[in-house]
């Protein structure tokens, strides 16, 4: 399936160590909102954009920390506990998304995966940099780049998202079944 090799696991862990120093959760969420503004609604970020900065409001900061903390826990567990534990955590987050009404379509899951892989595997410049120029990301992957990092993150995010979707759908089915049995 999406089994990571030891080299891929190590590459994911090493790249994450560098990425998390850049407050990567903020960069991921900012890129999601820039690519698809409806992500603000999915994550409960409701601000008057004319008067308030979306990227510094409390809701944005909270969601960006949630994204980063989840990825930090998942990546830190890679190779040290069974991958099933990471999948269970992702599955549970999918269930929570159901109850919070965070219903992503397939295109949004793909956007989340693509943005996460691109931003985490990009150099991002110095750790004091507060923004990443998203237009420059494709040029960061020349044919001679370290593909093991990218492949590792692609596999990792594919398995995490698969489990989040499964958790969401299983919970939706369970609730649909509960609704049917009430009548």
Image (cartoon, rainbow, N blue to C red):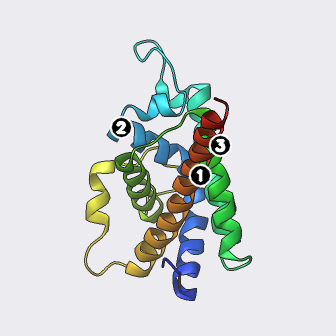
Q: Is residue 83 visible?
A: yes
List x then y, in percent, for residue 60: 56, 32
Q: Residue at image x 48%, y 26%?
A: 54
User: Which residue corresponds to the image point at 48% horizontal and 46% vertical from the top-left?
Assistant: 27
Mark closest to the chain's N terminus, 2 or 3:
2
Residue labelled with disc 3: 96
Neighbor class of circle 3 (other Cα within 10 Å; few <14, some 14-19, many 20+) is some
Using the image, tell me which numbered label, if any, was put on residue 170: 1
Q: Is residue 162 left or right of residue 133?
A: right
Give the residue displayed 45% in from the left and 42% down from the top: 104
Which of discs 1 and 3 lies nearer the camera? The answer is 1
Q: CA distance from mark 2 to mark 3?
A: 25 Å
Q: Earlier in the sequence, mark 2 or mark 1?
A: 2
In the displayed orientation, state which residue is furthest to the bottom.
6
* Residue 34: numbered disc: 2
Residue at image position (53%, 70%) is 15
Q: Is residue 71 rendered to the left or right of residue 51?
A: right
Q: Using the image as rendered, state which of residue 2 and residue 136 is in the foreground.
A: 2
Judging depth in this view, the residue of 147 and 156 nearest the camera is 156
Question: Compared to 38, does 21 lie above or below?
Answer: below
């Amino acid at each position: 399936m999406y089994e990571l090799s030891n080299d891929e696991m190590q590459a994911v862990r090493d790249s994450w160590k560098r990425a998390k120093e850049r407050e990567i959760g903020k960069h991921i969420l900012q890129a999601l909102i820039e690519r698809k503004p409806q992500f603000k609604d999915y994550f409960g970020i409701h601000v008057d954009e004319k008067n308030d900065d979306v990227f510094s409001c409390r809701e944005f900061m909270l969601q960006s920390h949630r994204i980063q903390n989840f990825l930090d826990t998942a990546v830190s567990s890679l190779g040290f506990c069974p991958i099933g534990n990471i999948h269970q955590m992702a599955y549970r987050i999918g269930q929570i998304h159901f109850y919070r009404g965070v219903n992503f379509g397939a295109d949004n899951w793909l956007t989340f995966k693509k943005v996460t892989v691109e931003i985490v595997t990009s150099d991002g410049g110095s750790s004091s940099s507060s923004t990443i120029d998203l237009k420059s990301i494709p040029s960061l992957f020349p044919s001679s780049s370290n593909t093991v990092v990218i492949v590792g993150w692609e596999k990792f995010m594919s398995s995490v998202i698969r489990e989040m979707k499964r958790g969401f759908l299983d919970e939706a089915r369970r609730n649909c079944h509960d609704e049917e049995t009430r009548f």
